[in-house]
Amino acid sequence: MRHTYILVTAIVLLILMSGCAYPSNELKKNQTPNQAQLDMVQSSVEEYQERTSGLLPIRTKPNETPIFEKYLIDFNLLKEQGVLSEVPGNAYENGGIYQYAILYPETEPQVKLIDLRITDELRNVLLRINTYRDKKLYPPYGEKVGPNLYSVDYEKIGLDAPPVVDSPYSEALLPIIMDTEGNLFVDYRIDLNSALKEYEHYFKEGDDIRYLLAENTPFLPAYSLPITIKDNEPVFMTE
């Protein structure tokens, strides 16, 4: 995961910008998750698999792509097979703010959503950080929040408050954090703390509890790092 500054910047910008510039359609149906649309795509994916001997209608992504951003649904493949007549109105491809992706592609594929508003916020902060690094070289580290993880010193990049994103799971504001290379991530520990209390689970220390959010909600915890449980609290995994 460690790369040179230039390579990291190029890769992160490529990943983030691939989904951030969604069309500016403000129809309400395009701004909310819709269970009927999720069910429709789920059925289409299952029928596609039946017709293609188990293949999934996904875009090819590099192996190193983080797990929750890796298996994006290719709606063109679904339409070509005749298993989907139209792209959901809230999908990025149809002017919405969500990317449709698959959880558990090799065992029990489940259709989930990635909130592209998060992608937008990360891109905006990344651009500010890169401007800062053009002059200072090192990332604008704030306080340490985990193993090799730091908050963003917002004052150094010209912000009035620490950078956050709106949680897709709750009304919480989730911190944006960075690693020692300046890569940005979303800190989902607030939502995971609530999820540990809300959902029945059998996770133990060393397990990646991000799946508690992915399995029990329509959304994937995109742009995150592995988090485990220790003393009944969510903590970042050590390397």
Image (cartoon, rainbow, N blue to C red):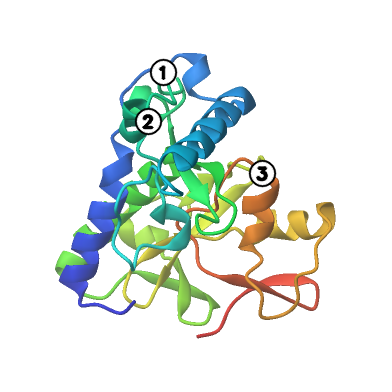
- Left or right relative to 124: residue 191: right
Q: Which residue is mark 3?
A: 217
Q: Residue at x 32, y 40 (%)?
A: 20
In the depicted structure, whether residue 201 falls above or below residue 213: below
Residue 5 spot, x, y in % from top left: 20, 73
Tell which of 107 and 177 is nearer to you: 107
Q: Quadrant of residue 134?
A: bottom left
**Is residue 223 something one can see in this rendering?**
yes
Marks 3, 1: nearer the viewer: 1
Q: Which residue is mark 1?
A: 85
Q: Marks 2 and 1: in contact by CB < 8 Å?
A: no
Residue type marked 3: Thr
Q: CA distance from mark 3 to mark 2?
A: 19 Å
Q: Residue at x 50, y 31 (%)?
A: 44
Where disc 2 sits, the SS reads helix
Q: Which residue is mark 2?
A: 92
Residue type marked 1: Ser
Within 10 Å of the Cα at label 3, are there few (<14), some (14-19), or many (20+) other Cα atoms? some
